[in-house]
Image: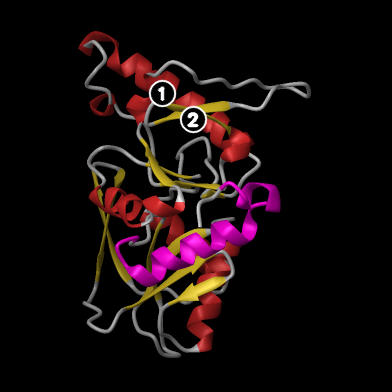
Amino acid sequence: MVLVVANAGDAVASAFVRRYARQGVRLLRPGDLSRSGWRYESGDHAKPSQVVVAGRVCRETQLAGVITRLASVAPADLPHIEPADRAYIAQEMQAFLLAWLHMLPCPVLNRPTPVCLAGEWWSPQTWIHKACRLGVPVARSEWYVGRGRCMKAIRPVREHPHAASITVVGSQIIGNAVPRVVQYATRLAQATELDLVTVRFSSPNNDARFLDASLWPNLADRTIAAAVMRHVRRQCPPVWREVVPA
């Protein structure tokens, strides 16, 4: 079984799950954590965890991989919880998913961090800073500061009509660009320990400059979706491959 962790409003995740349902792909939403049957223990002698998906209890050893498309659990994700309790329950579920996803022995795209369940969720400014430190050329941009605070938005000085997107899925590269641009994308992915990321550049040529990055590559793209499935199958131990439907 391959789990896709996403909220109810993620249409791309739902479409991906429908496309690969026969191959054991299932959707896990925050509300599913309220179902009876979950188990998670920490420590050296902890028993394998249990997950409840579509009303079915499964052991972690039945998971071939997890694709995380959820940054955090929000109160709006829990309409079945009393309104007064939603914020607290959302925080508890966030903490649980952080611990559970971090310890899973199967491939997790991407492993959670304390600030995001889907990996390093940086501001555009932080991405630019990281790219500069790695020797990746960056596009010139304007910063808008209001009342002593840096606002999140960065406006490019000019448009980039020929921008190129490079998606990194483990060791697989999706996108058309010269080798130098591909190297820039893989360098950023490796430095941030991301198995799944899309990096945008101003062009696919040698004059390319970094624009931004996303932890949520477009799974509606069949090439990217197929690469994700290949990565999960290659990375999972043989004992788990046997339980994934052909």
Give yes or no for contact between labels 2 and 1 (Cβ–Cβ under 8 Å): yes
Where disc 2 sits, the SS reads helix
Residue at horizontal 40 percent and vertical 53 percent from the top: 22
Q: Which residues are magenta?
A: 219-243
> For mark 1, what is the residue?
33
Q: Residue at x 55, y 62 (%)?
A: 231
Residue 110 in view here: yes
Give the amino acid at mark 1.
Leu
Looking at the image, which residue sits at the far right?
44
Q: Earlier in the sequence, mark 2 or mark 1?
A: 1
Image point (54%, 48%), residue name: 65
Number of the front mark, 2 or 1: 1
Taking 99 as reference, is 224 above or below it? below
Residue assigned mark 2: 97
Q: Is residue 222 above or below residue 54?
A: below
Amino acid marked by disc 2? Leu
Mark 1 burial class by Cα count in 10 Å: few <14, some 14-19, many 20+: some
